[in-house]
Image (cartoon, helix red, strand yellow):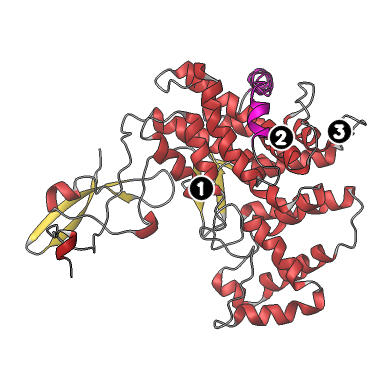
């Protein structure tokens, strides 16, 4: 129960609204009974000042540059743990013991295969189909192949569906890539780790052996950790909203993938890489910095600043280190794109214009460079984002389903259209 209240005065009437205290971060005012009591709604485009749910999974403090999963800082998880450990943490609320981790890793690994008839689903797409279009279609179709894990009222089926999606998403993503480049599908190998298996499915071919560099596999795993969850963003909110209707988890995640495909959400790293290519060389940076500062110029520095983080993106520091490791292993010492990126970062951290506006490099600034170096084309960047974010979507969906306060989402509106009009026969319309 709330011990504090806020007072809202409308005309001569005053209403008491409960205030609920957060574990960390801003408290919230409960307006659930506002319409009933006042016949009014609140107006909040984008829901940026509205808490749509109660959650214990991820916390972000954008002003301080903090990202916590179940209380653990993202940099510690990415530096010392691995992706499947982070998956366990997001799903169950605590880090696994050695025994729990061994069991969890094995259970996920045993679900990596896709139903054999799904190969026909892939080959039904045009060869030039965007990999994200394939992802939306194939993930949505999982419910047509795995009927034994679509009953959301059954905790056992919810768990199986969760494991299946975490396990099968790398296979789906890798096959979408293989199909787009005209190469045969490579089946998962249960003797490989999560990230190593994914790289093997993406880059191995039947004609020769493929050796997986452990540093590159570690970098891929770290990228997955850094993208695993990010609180109530657009795609996560989409998954929750779809799930609130009782839709099966495969359909909900497909909806999340569709939302993530939008360039304002999941396409930022591709946009950052395109910007670096547009700049072209270090000596052209001052020209583009001046353009970025010119409010009348449509050019914007992509990969700088964040809607949430007004301080340095905590994921960017780990991503920067990962970028250097990958380029070092691959022997890329004098990469012009990286040179531009490093100089831009230096300017952003020192220039008062950027500091005053909180325009620090974010994770997308470095991840595009890293993924390109690993051999992925730009149209695969958002696919990899979807792969990593699946566990966050599933954890949030699972939390919502198990929340006794959960109800179907129904945002309101401020109607500005025509009022009641009577129908006029077509021959009498002027």
Vertical order, 13 against 160 (above or below): below
- In x, y percent, where is residue 275? 70, 67
Nearest to N terminus: mark 3 or mark 2: 2
x then y, percent, for residue 301:
64, 70
- Label 3: which residue? 205
Name, please, the residue furthest toward the front: 427
Report x, y in % for residue 79: 71, 42
Question: Residues under labels 3 and 2: Cα distance?
Answer: 12 Å
- In the rendered structure, the answer to whether residue 280 lies left or right of residue 71 reads right
Q: Give the answer, above or below, for where 241 lies relative to 290.
A: above
Which residue corresponds to the image point at 78% horizontal and 23% vertical from the top-left?
189
Residue highlighted by disc 1: 259
Q: Is 103 within the magenta?
A: yes
Q: Which residue: 68% across, 27% down?
A: 119
Whether residue 226 is visible: no
Quadrant holding the C terminus? bottom left
Query: What secondary structure is found at the residue carrying circle 2?
Result: helix
Give the mark toward the camera: 1 or 3.
3
Region in magenta: 97-124
Q: Which residue is mark 2?
A: 175
Give the number of callouts: 3
Say which quadrant the N terminus sits in.
top left
Task: Give the image quarter of residue 344.
Answer: bottom right
Which numbered disc, 1 or 2, marks the residue closer to the eye? 2
Other residues around mark 1 within 10 Å, as few (<14) / some (14–19) / many (≥20): many
Outermost residue on the left side: it is: 12
Report if the CB atoms under discs 1 and 2 are less than 8 Å apart: no
Q: CA distance from mark 1 to mark 3?
A: 32 Å
Element at label 1: helix
Sequence-wise, which precedes: disc 1 or disc 2? 2
Q: Which mark is residue 357?
A: none
> Element at badge 3?
loop
């Amino acid at each position: 129960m709330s011990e504090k209240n806020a007072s809202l005065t409308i005309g001569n009437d005053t209403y008491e609204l409960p205030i609920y205290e957060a574990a960390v971060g801003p408290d919230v005012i409960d307006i659930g009974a506002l319409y009933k009591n006042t016949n009014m709604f609140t107006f909040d485009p984008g829901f940026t000042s509205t808490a749509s749910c109660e959650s214990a999974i991820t916390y972000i403090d954008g002003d301080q540059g903090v990202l916590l999963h179940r209380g653990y800082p993202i940099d510690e998880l990415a530096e010392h743990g691995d992706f499947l450990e982070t998956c366990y943490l997001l799903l169950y609320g605590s880090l696994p013991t050695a025994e729990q981790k061994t069991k969890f890793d094995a259970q996920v690994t045993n679900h990596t295969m896709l139903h054999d008839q799904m190969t026909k689903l892939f080959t039904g797409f045009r060869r030039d189909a965007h990999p994200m279009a394939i992802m939306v279609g194939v993930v949505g179709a999982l419910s047509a192949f795995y009927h034994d894990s679509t009953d959301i009222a059954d905790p056992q089926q919810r768990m199986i569906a969760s494991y299946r999606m975490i396990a099968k998403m790398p296979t789906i993503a890798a096959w979408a890539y293989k199909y787009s480049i005209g190469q045969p599908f490579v089946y998962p190998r249960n003797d490989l780790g999560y990230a190593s298996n994914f790289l093997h499915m993406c880059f191995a071919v039947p004609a020769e052996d493929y050796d997986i560099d452990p540093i590159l596999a570690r970098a891929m795993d770290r990228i997955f950790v850094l993208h695993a969850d990010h609180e109530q963003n657009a795609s996560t909110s989409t998954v929750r909203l779809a799930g609130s209707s009782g839709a099966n988890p495969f359909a909900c995640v497909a909806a999340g993938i569709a939302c993530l495909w939008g360039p304002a959400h999941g396409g930022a790293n591709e946009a950052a890489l395109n910007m670096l290519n547009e700049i072209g060389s270090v000596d052209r940076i001052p020209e583009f910095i001046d353009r970025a500062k010119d409010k009348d110029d449509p050019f914007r520095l992509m990969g700088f600043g964040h809607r949430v983080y007004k301080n340095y993106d905590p994921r960017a520091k780990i991503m920067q280190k990962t970028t250097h490791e990958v380029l070092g292993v691959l022997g890329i010492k004098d990469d012009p794109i990286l040179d531009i990126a490093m100089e831009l970062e230096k300017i952003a951290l020192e220039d008062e214009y950027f500091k005053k506006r909180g325009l620090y490099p974010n994770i997308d600034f470095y991840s595009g460079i890293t993924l390109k170096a690993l051999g992925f084309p730009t149209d695969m960047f958002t696919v990899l984002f979807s792969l990593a974010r699946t566990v966050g979507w599933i954890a949030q969906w699972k939390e919502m389903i198990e929340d006794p306060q959960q109800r179907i989402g129904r945002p309101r509106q401020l109607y500005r259209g025509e009022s009641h009009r009577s129908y006029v026969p077509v021959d009498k319309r002027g």
